[in-house]
Image (cartoon, rainbow, N blue to C red):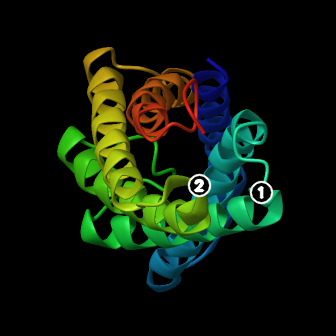
Amino acid sequence: MRWFLGTVVGTTLGHILAVALTAVAADALFAVTTSVNRTVRLVVVVIIGAVDGGSIALGQWFALRAEVPRLAPVRWILLSALAGAAGWGVASTSAHLQSVNPHAGVTPSEALVAGMVVGLMLGIAQGSTLRRALGRPLPWVSANAAGFAAGLTASAWLERTLALPSSLPALVGGPVTGFVVAALTGAVLVLLGRVGGRR
């Protein structure tokens, strides 16, 4: 239960902060020329990715600290933030995302690609930190890649189907993505005996 709560809250917080940063960045993007706009847009997406990854990791750390006492919070959060930045940076170019906020205004197919990339990056970063606890990082990496791909795709589909205003995807997409990621990564933790099982 703590894992679900921590992951969902962290993911939702990341989505909300993305909306706030997007609002701040809108003025800067409006003020620059078109040639500079793409660079500024990428920088904003990378910053949002770092905040997103760090927020998710913070929520997860609160849930994991009792189960994995050796988990260093600074390393866990910092690596997740760097992975989020790298993941969204790569995803924004590979999926050709047009929105400054990578959580809003994307198609389900763009969200699928972005989710796989971001989840893969986060999974690798966190898996390296959890290596001692999990033993095998591959299930963790796979669960993150699948979780973010499915979660972000579902969020994008809901946003388009419900025609949500620009501020609402964070409140809908955050919990949806967080729930899917928490379910898959939580299953890995249970199977490997880190949560609710043997240690």
Q: Nearer the viewer, residue 64 or 91?
A: 64
* Residue 59: x %, y % from top left: 71, 38
Label 2 CA crowd tier, 10 Å (few <14, some 14–19, many 20+): some
Q: Is residue 163 above or below residue 10?
A: above
Side of 156 relative to 37 (left or right): left
Per the model, the C-alpha gap separating discs 1 and 2 is 9 Å
Side of 110 relative to 16 (left or right): left
- The residue tagged with tag 1: helix, strand or loop? loop
Q: Nearer the viewer, residue 42 or 37?
A: 42
* Residue 68: x %, y % from top left: 71, 46
Identify which residue is drawn at 74% across, 46% down: 58
Side of 107 relative to 143 (left or right): left
Q: Nearer the viewer, residue 37 or 168?
A: 168
Side of 152 relative to 27 (left or right): left
Q: Which residue is mark 2?
A: 133
Q: Nearer the viewer, residue 7 or 188?
A: 188
Label 1 CA crowd tier, 10 Å (few <14, some 14–19, many 20+): few
Identify which residue is drawn at 35% across, 45% down: 143
* Residue 48: x %, y % from top left: 61, 58
Q: Amino acid at mark 2?
A: Ala
**Is disc 1 in contact with disc 2, using a CB cutoff of under 8 Å?**
yes
